[in-house]
Amino acid sequence: MAGYRGGMGGNMQNIMKQAQKMQEDMQRISAMLDDWEIVGTSGGEAVVVYMNAKKIINGIELDESIVDPTDVEMLEDLIMAAINDGYKKAEEVYKEKMGPYGNMNGLDI
């Protein structure tokens, strides 16, 4: 065959370069998601939950006016609502940034 250079060496090398670049991109984005601040709120910001885009909670702030020892259930509900708000926002960021790579980071979102 005239012009046949044989083998898949060049193509395989190209695939390996693309895979390496994809892995580097995923590591860079994963690190960025660790540092991305997500703020979940409830009760008109009476409860504020801070987390990263991987849904790791870093802090919670409570407005003291909502702390009623006779109604702990309401406080629990507000905290859960703020966490869920943050999780929803974190999921959107995660899907936007990691979506092109599939779910390869072990996070079940």
Image (spheres, helix red, strand yellow):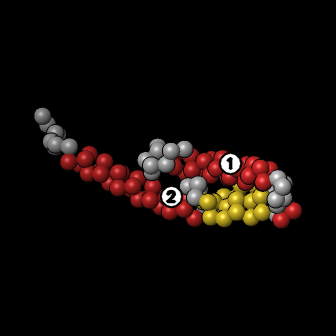
> Residue 68's mark?
none
Residue at 54%, 62% (x, y): give it. Answer: 34
Q: Earlier in the sequence, mark 2 or mark 1?
A: 2
In the figure, is residue 54 to the left or right of 6? right
What amino acid type is highlighted by mark number 2?
Ile
74 and 79: which one is in front?
74
Residue at 45%, 55% (x, y): give it. Answer: 26
Mark 2 secondary-structure assignment: helix
Q: Position of residue 58 (x, y in %)?
A: 62, 64
Residue at 84%, 58% (x, y): give it. Answer: 68
Classify 10 Å Cα crowding around label 1: few (below 14), some (14-19), many (20 and above): some
Rounded to the nearest angstrom, the CA distance separating label 2 from label 1 is 23 Å
Q: Please tell me how many numbered marks the rendered image carries.
A: 2
Identify the residue under disc 1: 84
Q: Residue furthest left?
A: 1
What amino acid type is highlighted by mark number 1?
Asn
61 and 8: which one is in front?
61
Nearer to us of marks 2 and 1 is 1
19 and 14: which one is in front?
19
> Residue 29's mark?
2
In this rendering, the answer to whether 68 lies above or below 80 is: below
In the figure, is residue 70 to the left or right of 60? right
Q: Position of residue 28 (x, y in %)?
A: 47, 61
